[in-house]
Amino acid sequence: MNGSPLRFAEVLVDIPAAKHPYTYAVPREFEPWIEPGVAVRVPFGNRSEVGGFIVACPAPPPPAVAKIIRAVVPEQVLPTKMKKLLSWVADHYLASLYQVYLAALPRGILTGRSP
């Protein structure tokens, strides 16, 4: 990454079994858009891309090699102030945090568009 330190973000992925965020490397070209609440597309397991939301950035480096964020949807951002409310909704209604984040966005926002 041209001599600059690699930045990482914690991403909540759209996988029912994923109960916690995963750490991904942030490509330099996506830096301007990376912040909590931003929708992204990331590789996960054997899937080439799944939807996700950034829940923390910067994040500490992972113990293993991090996969790289593939796309960002910069037009819509969930305000950081909503994170606590959305976490409460997920806990109260026993819903996945990803599904609660998704419900808070306009329909169709995670179409895989990148900046």
Image (spheres, rainbow, N blue to C red):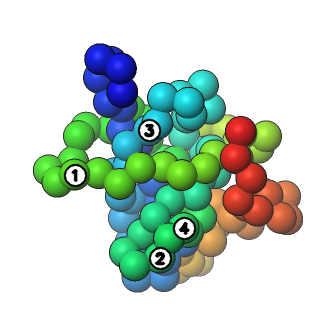
Secondary structure of the residue carrying numbered label 2: strand
Q: Can you tell which quarter of the image residue 75 is in? A: top right
Sort mark 1 into few (<14), some (14-19) or many (20+) by Cα contacts within 10 Å. Answer: few
Q: Contact, CB < 8 Å: mark 2 with mark 4?
A: yes
- Can residue 34 be seen here? yes
Cα separation, mark 2 vs mark 4, equals 6 Å
Q: Up-down: is 77 above or below 105?
A: above
Q: Contact, CB < 8 Å: mark 4 with mark 1?
A: no
Cα separation, mark 1 vs mark 3, equals 13 Å
- Can residue 89 be seen here? no
Secondary structure of the residue carrying numbered label 1: loop
Q: Which residue corresponds to mark 3?
A: 26
Q: State which tag comes first along the sequence, 3 or 2.
A: 3
Secondary structure of the residue carrying numbered label 3: strand
Q: Contact, CB < 8 Å: mark 3 with mark 2?
A: no
Give the amino acid type for the residue marked by disc 3 in the picture.
Answer: Val
Sort mark 3 into few (<14), some (14-19) or many (20+) by Cα contacts within 10 Å. Answer: many
Picture coordinates of residue 23, whole percent (x, y): 34, 51
Picture coordinates of residue 17, whole percent (x, y): 40, 82
Q: Up-down: is 79 above or below 93?
A: above
Label annotation for residue 65: 1
Give the amino acid type for the residue marked by disc 1 in the picture.
Answer: Val
x 69%, y 64%: residue = 102
Picture coordinates of residue 27, whole percent (x, y): 46, 36
Cα separation, mark 1 vs mark 2, equals 17 Å
